[in-house]
Image (cartoon, grey):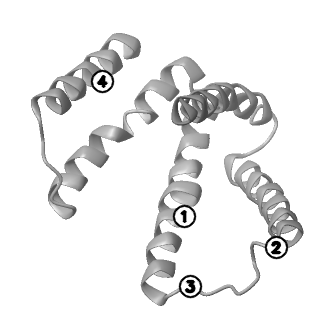
Amino acid sequence: MKSFIFAFLTALCWGAAPILGKMGLAKLPPFLALSLRSFTISIILLAAGLISGSFKNLQVDARSFIFIAAEGIMASLLGQLAYYYALKNSEASKVVPVSSSFPLITLALAFLFLNESITLKKILGTMLVILGIILIRY
């Protein structure tokens, strides 16, 4: 039940965020908007980490750091910047379904690099995602 509540809160936040982003991008270029967003988040995370004591005894191995840093560059920098450009130049209701099709990429990469299985359910789900993108796009 706890995981469902967190998943629902995730959907609520991610569902509302494009509306705020689209409104914020009305008078800002995407790069500046992403910089402001990242700066704000960094300040909040730094303050929360210092207050909670999460940074005490900070030990991170190099391999973990590299993977997490690469994930951040892919998702929070390159992906978010591309998303802001798309959102600035199109309708949120069209951009979000296409950009939210990332599980298709994850499915293929997880199969290739993590040896995860491809099941009938995953194939059917993938086909439904593709159908949804086609329906919304036109």
Question: Which residue does the numbered mark 4 point to in the structure image?
Answer: 129
Three-letter amino acid code at disc 2?
Answer: Gly
Front residue of this view, candidates 10 and 77 = 10
Up-down relation of residue 75 to residue 102 (above or below): below
Quadrant housing the C terminus: top left
Eye-nearest disc, 1 or 2: 2
Three-letter amino acid code at disc 1?
Answer: Gly
Three-letter amino acid code at disc 3?
Answer: Val
Kindly report the distance in space between the C-alpha atoms of the residues bearing marks 2 and 3: 16 Å
Front residue of this view, candidates 117 and 95 = 117
Q: Residue extending furthest front?
A: 1
Pointers 1 and 2 in contact (C-beta within 8 Å): no
The mark that comes first in sequence, 3 or 1, is: 3
The residue shown at (24%, 54%) is: 110
Eye-nearest disc, 3 or 1: 3
**What number is the disc on residue 34?**
none
Front residue of this view, candidates 35 and 55 = 55
**What number is the disc on residue 60?**
3
Q: Quadrant of residue 115?
A: bottom left
**What number is the disc on residue 72?**
1
Q: Is mark 1 on a helix, strand or loop?
A: helix
Three-letter amino acid code at disc 4?
Answer: Val
Relative horizontal placement of residue 109, taking residue 56 as reference (left or right): left
Question: Which residue does the numbered mark 2 point to in the structure image?
Answer: 53
